[in-house]
Amino acid sequence: MPDMPAPQRSDHRKYEQLVAAAKALKPLRVAVAHPCDAVSLESAIQAAKLCLIVPILVGPPARLMDVAARAGLDLAGFEIVASEHSHDSADKAVALVRAGRADGLMKGSLHTDELMGAVVARDTGVRTARRISHCFIMDVPGHDDALIITDAAVNIAPTLEEKVDIVQNAIDLAHALGVEEVRVAILSAMETVNPKVPSTIEAAALCKMADRGQITGALIDGPLALDNAINVEAAEIKHITSPVAGRANVLVVPDLEAGNMLAKSLSFLAGADAAGIILGARVPIILTSRADSELTRLASCAVAVLVAAARAAKASAAIP
């Protein structure tokens, strides 16, 4: 059996544009929770060197110094907030946000659940009335635009009510990234409403809620299968007339399992890169993976900078 060809890799143009746009803005003050491995510590330092973020390193000082020495990194000039362990790092990083000393959070080498536990804590967290959700910003080879996929990392089986916030978070993100026309596809296994497939019912409901102004800022259509959401020819074959079909730049998946498999399929079979951000808290939360390339980690930082800038501009515009 012949070897399968390696997946085509992205030329990184989309991420380079994100980083360039973020570098034109003021660096974001970011509390980096427990960067106690070389990858997370180097990511924060590299983002600082590019003037994307001003990191505050939250972790046990001795461990941070040891990791830096082993990786050949210089921590001179970086603020360190001492913590005892990973849970304490998460709590103290969130406390920096509550105190107004940080305008973003970044996951280090602790588990995502540890950081998010501190974020959503009832009395000491930084949640808002909006549901917290995750977005991948994917640079897919051969695809003209970046694809936003949500939610593939936080909400396991979101309800219809929760999906309203998940969709709105993704729309707001797309606008922050400078997308002129946001086209949202609510994905399912088919493009027709089928009472036996709950995701198709929820997709139809979300579209009607958009018609009623309960979701704003985008063109929304669904249910749509993946092929007729992103491929014009597939949509035409199915005779789907829609400004979204075949041209979606935001993909809303039915649940975490579907989203995770979609994102990883694009990464490992199509050679896509996947920057990640968590939205819905008081500040953007940078979520990276140890398997990410350096540019992907920097792109995640750049996305956070752009999201924070968009929020600040919106808040300023709301002041009479």
Image (tube, helix red, strand yellow):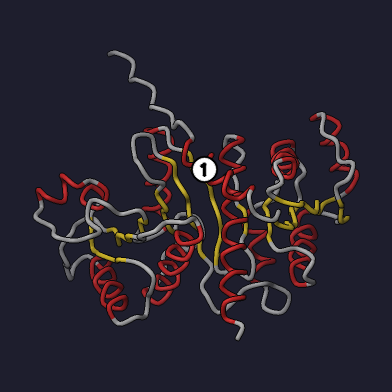
Relative vertical location of residue 242 with respect to residue 261 in this rendering, above or below: below
In terms of secondary structure, where does tag 1 sit?
helix
Residue occupying image coordinates x 25% and y 53%: 229
Q: Quadrant of the C terminus?
A: bottom right
Q: Is residue 225 left or right of residue 239?
A: right
Residue 208 pos. (x, y %): 26, 77
Residue nearer the viewer, 154 or 169: 169
The image quarter in which residue 252 lies: bottom left
Relative vertical location of residue 207 with respect to residue 182 in this rendering, above or below: below
Residue occupying image coordinates x 85% and y 56%: 83
Relative vertical location of residue 290 with respect to residue 94 in this rendering, above or below: above
Q: Residues within 10 Å of mark 1 (few under 14, many from 20)?
A: some
**Residue for badge 1:** 17
Give the residue type that dot 1 points to: Gln
Q: Quadrant of the N terminus?
A: top left
Relative vertical location of residue 218 with respect to residue 124 in this rendering, above or below: above
Residue 15 pos. (x, y %): 51, 41
